[in-house]
Amino acid sequence: MIVLGVAAGLVILWLALVAVLWVQQKRSGETVDWRAVMRLAPDVVRLIRRLVADRTVSRATRWWLGGLLVYLLLPIDLIPDFLPVIGYVDDAIVVVIALRFAIRYAGMPAIARHWPGTPEGLRSVLALVGAAR
């Protein structure tokens, strides 16, 4: 049951990221690259994993991001995930806060170096967290 809840949470978080990316690309007048949209959430997870493994990133930042990954996998949340929509808001907020922290303390060069996706995807993530390049 826990695995199902975690999987559902990741799918809903991914759908929220997809919606944000789609709206952002429509506002900028660009066509929507659905391949990039589909890769956004997995790219964010890979970015966090890579930052955690990077010894050049400060230990405190790596611990913070590792804690983020653990928090997202644990069934214990500030707002229970079984509540429709708002149950996953806390997860999205924690991800945004952690990414802003990583950008501030690991630096944009580390973020750019470890980003596994497209440049457009990175721009979208940075816009989502309010750190547009």
Image: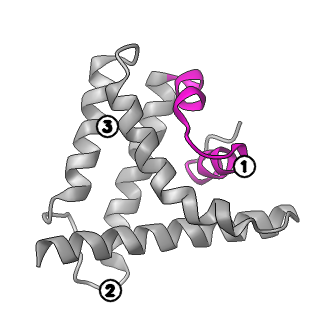
Q: Pointer 1: residues within 10 angstroms few (<14), some, or many (20+)?
A: some
The amino acid sitting under disc 3 is Leu
Q: Residues within 10 Å of mark 2 (few under 14, many from 20)?
A: few
Q: In this view of the protein, which residue sits in the foreground, 49 or 23?
A: 49
Q: Residue at x 54, y 31 (%)?
A: 111
Picture colour scheme: one colour
User: Residue 42's spot in the image, x, y percent?
Assistant: 46, 55
Examine the rendering and report whether any part of residue 92 can be seen. yes
- 2 vs 1, front mark: 1
Q: Secondary structure at mark 2?
A: loop
Q: Which residues are magenta?
A: 107-129
Give the residue type at disc 1: Glu
Tag 1 or tag 2, which sits nearer the N-term? 2
- Secondary structure of residue under mark 3: helix
Quickly name the residue at label 1: 120
79 vs 58, left or right, is: left
Badge 1 marks a residue whose secondary structure is helix
